[in-house]
Image (tube, grey):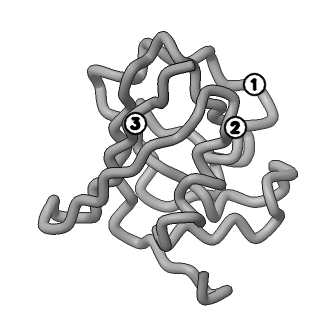
């Protein structure tokens, strides 16, 4: 099984962290393993929007459509765009090969991960 390359682009593009994840892994978990400041207060239960990411326009079509619940949670996130998703709802797929996401400008991790 081939890994999926993930690029986390920080606001302004001045910092980029490249990571690898295995198919079936959740993007939020990969972020936590690489000290990316995505909080995920609800621990992936889709009860908050603190793991909001902006998927690159090139990669957005790879993802399945968000559920209505996810879209409702994104209403609470700051800096939402047409390609915004919750990282707790993105499970990597081998056929993607890679995925690039940007952290929103107001990203912070109050849990200190």
Residue indicated by mark 2: 89
Q: Position of residue 109 (x, y in %)?
A: 56, 80
Q: Residue furthest front?
A: 1
Residue at screen point 58% across, 45% down: 27
Distance between the alpha carbons at the discs numbered 2 and 3: 12 Å
Residue at screen point 40% across, 36% down: 55
85 to 52, vertically: above or below: above
Residue indicated by mark 3: 55
Q: On the rendered structure, is 102 left or right of 49?
A: left
How crowded pointer 2 is (Cα within 10 Å; few <14, some 14-19, many 20+) is rated as many
Earlier sequence position, callout 1 versus callout 2: 1
Describe the element under mark 1 as helix, strand or loop. loop
Residue indicated by mark 1: 67
Q: Are marks 1 and 2 in contact (CB under 8 Å)?
A: yes
Q: Quadrant of residue 51?
A: bottom right
Distance between the alpha carbons at the discs numbered 1 and 2: 9 Å
């Amino acid at each position: 099984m081939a890994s999926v390359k993930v690029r986390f682009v920080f606001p302004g593009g001045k910092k980029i962290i490249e990571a690898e994840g295995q198919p079936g892994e959740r993007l939020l978990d990969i972020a936590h393993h690489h000290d990316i400041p995505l909080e995920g207060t609800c621990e992936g239960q889709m009860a908050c929007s603190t793991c909001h990411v902006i998927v690159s326009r090139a990669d957005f079509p790879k993802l399945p459509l968000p559920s209505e619940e996810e879209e409702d949670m994104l209403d609470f996130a700051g800096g939402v765009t047409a390609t915004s998703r919750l990282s707790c709802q993105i499970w990597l797929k081998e056929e993607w090969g890679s995925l690039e996401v940007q952290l929103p400008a107001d990203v912070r991790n109050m849990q200190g991960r």
